[in-house]
Image (cartoon, rainbow, N blue to C red):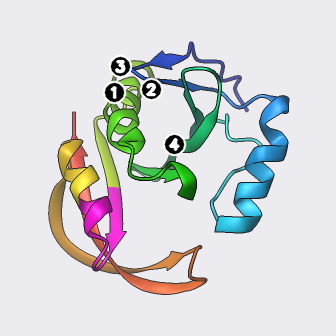
Amino acid sequence: MCSFQPAPITTQRLTLREAASRDAQVLSAWSAEAGALVPANPFDEDRKAFVIERQGGEIVGVIGFKARGRYTEINCWIAPIHRGNGYATEAAPAALAWARDNWGRKVVLAGHKTGAEALASLLIKAGFLYTGDVELRCNPAEGMLVPTRMMVWLA
């Protein structure tokens, strides 16, 4: 396992940084409450994850990547009380640029369940295009397989 200690990524309103022990309580509560995947050790060779923090230090969500064979997938989760503020729209391009420039990823996949128009809009704004594929994928929040429209981002 390699050590992963990236410099924080900053945007106009946000900082994307590695999780710290002080974040464990918040991240654990979110994981149990929302079914969000918050890995115990997100900083290994196949997975990179960042805590999304507003100015002032309040955690608003998480964003991360998981290598799956030749491809990498992105996932983002914003706490319900912080949704609708554009945090995911701001964090995604910064995280994708980091994945391209610092992790060497040229192709990133994403998906959204059919009917999730807000997530579709976010992915399109971040530069994703539809592949035309629909896969049955596990949705942790629903605890079942759901039709997922697949998208791709090319560096």
Density class for disc 1 (Cα within 10 Å; few <14, some 14-19, many ≥20) is some
Q: Which residues are magenta?
A: 110-120
Q: Position of residue 112 (x, y in %)?
A: 34, 68
Q: Label 3 is placed on what type of residue?
A: Asp
Do the CB atoms of the residues marked 1 and 4 lie less than 8 Å apart? no
For residue 148, what is the image quadrant?
Answer: bottom left
- Quick one: 94 or 101, which is closer to the camera? 94
Distance from Cα at disc 2 to Cα at disc 1: 6 Å
The residue under label 2 is: 103
Whether residue 109 sits left or right of residue 58 in the image: it is left
Residue 118 located within the stretch drawn in magenta? yes
Do the CB atoms of the residues marked 2 and 4 lie less than 8 Å apart? no
| Secondary structure found at label 2 | helix
| Label disc, if present, on residue 63 of the rendered structure | 4
Density class for disc 4 (Cα within 10 Å; few <14, some 14-19, many ≥20) is many
Distance from Cα at disc 3 to Cα at disc 2: 6 Å
The residue under label 3 is: 101
Q: Is residue 79 visible?
A: no
Do the CB atoms of the residues marked 3 and 2 lie less than 8 Å apart? yes
The residue under label 1 is: 100
